[in-house]
Image: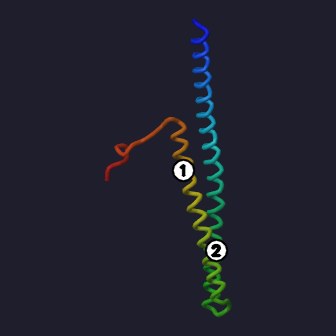
Amino acid sequence: MSAAALANHDGTVASYRQATLDAFQQVEDNLVALRILEQATQQQKRAVVSAQESLQRFTNRYKGGVDTYLQVITAQTAALANERNQADIQRRRMDASVLLVKALGGGWNVADLPQL
């Protein structure tokens, strides 16, 4: 085998190894992201429930004449912000799931979708 051919072979092997390592790294990164986002989902669910309970409490107190409507609006703002954060975390989980499938070499096309 000539020196040029051997160098070409070594380069090809090195490129293959690097591509394989990159793929493993992408899989690991997305698995970690999914684990972290699952924890964030659980925390955010609790935050949403807490904000909704707070909103209900302020609404009841407003109806009873104890609190001002500004406090109700503030509680509504907090509840909405928590719901938006929850939706953002869910989107990020979906992104990480898609990237994991891609890193694993999987794919799909429209024909794979269930028919209505």
Q: Secondary structure at mark 1?
A: helix
Q: Amino acid at mark 1?
A: Asp
Residue marked by disc 2: 78
The quadrant the N terminus occupies is top right
Q: Of residues 46 and 108, which is closer to you in this image?
A: 108
Q: Secondary structure at mark 2?
A: helix
Classify residue 91 by image quadrant: bottom right
Q: Residue at x 55, y 42 (%)?
A: 100
Q: Residue at x 59, y 62 (%)?
A: 86
Residue marked by disc 1: 95
**The furthest residue to the left:** 116
Determine the CA span between mark 1 and mark 2: 26 Å
Give above or below for 67 relative to 51: below
Position of residue 60 measured from the top left corner of the image (x, y, whole percent): 61, 85
Please indicate whether residue 108 sits to the left or right of residue 3 in the image. left
Q: Amino acid at mark 2?
A: Ala
